[in-house]
Amino acid sequence: MKAEAKRRNQSVSKLMGMGQRTGDFEGLETKRKQAAQLIERLAKANEGLQAEIAKYKKTSGKLQKRYELERDQRVKLEKERGERLQFINTLGHELKTPLTSIVASGGLLLEELKKGEAQSPRLRLLENIISATGKLQSRLNELLDMAKMETVGFILTFELIDIRPLLRNVVSEFNPVAKEKGQSLTLDLPPSVPMVNGDGEHLDQVLLNLISNAMKFSGEGTKIRVKLRQKGPDLVVSIKDNGPGITEEEQMRIFTPYYRLEADRQRFPGLGLGLTVSKHLVEQHGGKIWVESELGKGSTFLFSLPVAEQEAARAADL
Ligand code: ADP
């Protein structure tokens, strides 16, 4: 009985051994198939990759060509820009020089004539010539500014400045004219203000535009108040008049080139460019310009200039 069981066990073990070998073979076959599939997939992926690389090379070639084309165009444009600026400067010089000479000679002649004759038609004629030439100078400056703005932009030179002396100078320059018109022109400055990064000459031009507008559009005997204040990170200059005021609809349009209020087109000289140029200049300083106005009550034109970073940092340290 024992021998029989032993024999049966041996046969089962044999069979089991055979089964194991069959299992090994099937496992290997499956693995071989899996490997073949993997190789096939890898080959396909590689083909795809090669196609992508070829496409990329083509695109990169095209991009390189486009970059070179744009670089050449940029060089050409820079050259044209330089030529245009030079043309505008030359044109300005050619037109301004004779005008300056006419105004200066006219002024001297006027003084000479006044010595001999207090009132005469000749005096009046000469005064007319001088005044008309002055207007011609202003219009010419506006046109040249606009030409610069539209072609090459203003070229500003920034430095740390205290804006108060600038305001004092412009206001004192305008005071005699205001007096002549019976207008009062006052200036309100704080005892100390932080510096701004600005181009004095061009900020001067903004002030000149805004104060001369206030004087031009407000009637005789009106009040014009120029004020400077610090508001958070900005300095804000305001020019307030009690002139005719501007409707809300027109407030949106007066900063666009050539726009002038219907009522002012015939009555006052100008091209409708002063505010456009001022806006452009203030924005180049990183500031904003706007108007607050009520019809019949007057207008306040305001512009902000960011306090210079060094100054803001110093204030934060204190
Ligand atoms: P210009 O002074 O040559 O007309 P601006 O661009 O300086 O050009 O002004 C545009 C228009 O805005 C002016 O024609 C005028 O109608 C209006 N305007 C400007 N400033 C004032 C002001 N202080 N009061 C009333 N209207 C004004």
Image (cartoon, rainbow, N blue to C red):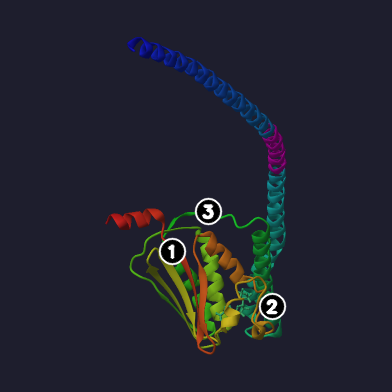
- Eyeballing the image, is 317 above or below 294? above
Q: Residues within 10 Å of mark 1 (few under 14, many from 20)?
A: many
Q: Residues within 10 Å of mark 3 (few under 14, many from 20)?
A: few
Q: How many marks?
A: 3
The residue that disc 2 covers is 126
Residue 237 numbered tag: none
Amino acid type at image mark 2: Leu
- Tell me, yes or no, whether the highlighted magenta stretch contains residue 67: yes
Labelled pair 3, 1 in contact (Cβ < 8 Å): no
Q: Earlier in the sequence, mark 3 or mark 1?
A: 3
Which residue lies at the image location 66% right of the left edge and 75% below the top edge? 259
Question: Is residue 99 toward the left or the right of residue 231 in the image?
Answer: right
Q: CA distance from mark 2 to mark 3?
A: 39 Å
Which residue lies at the image location 38% right of the left edge and 53% below the top edge? 310
Q: Nearer the viewer, residue 137 or 252?
A: 252
Q: Quadrant of residue 111 in the image?
A: bottom right
Q: Residues within 10 Å of mark 2 (few under 14, many from 20)?
A: some
Q: Nearer the viewer, residue 143 or 66?
A: 66
The residue that disc 3 covers is 157
Q: Determine the secondary structure under disc 2.
A: helix
Q: Which residues, given as a range, are shown in magenta?
A: 54-72
The residue that disc 1 covers is 163
Q: CA distance from mark 2 to mark 1?
A: 38 Å
Q: Quadrant of residue 249 in the image?
A: bottom right
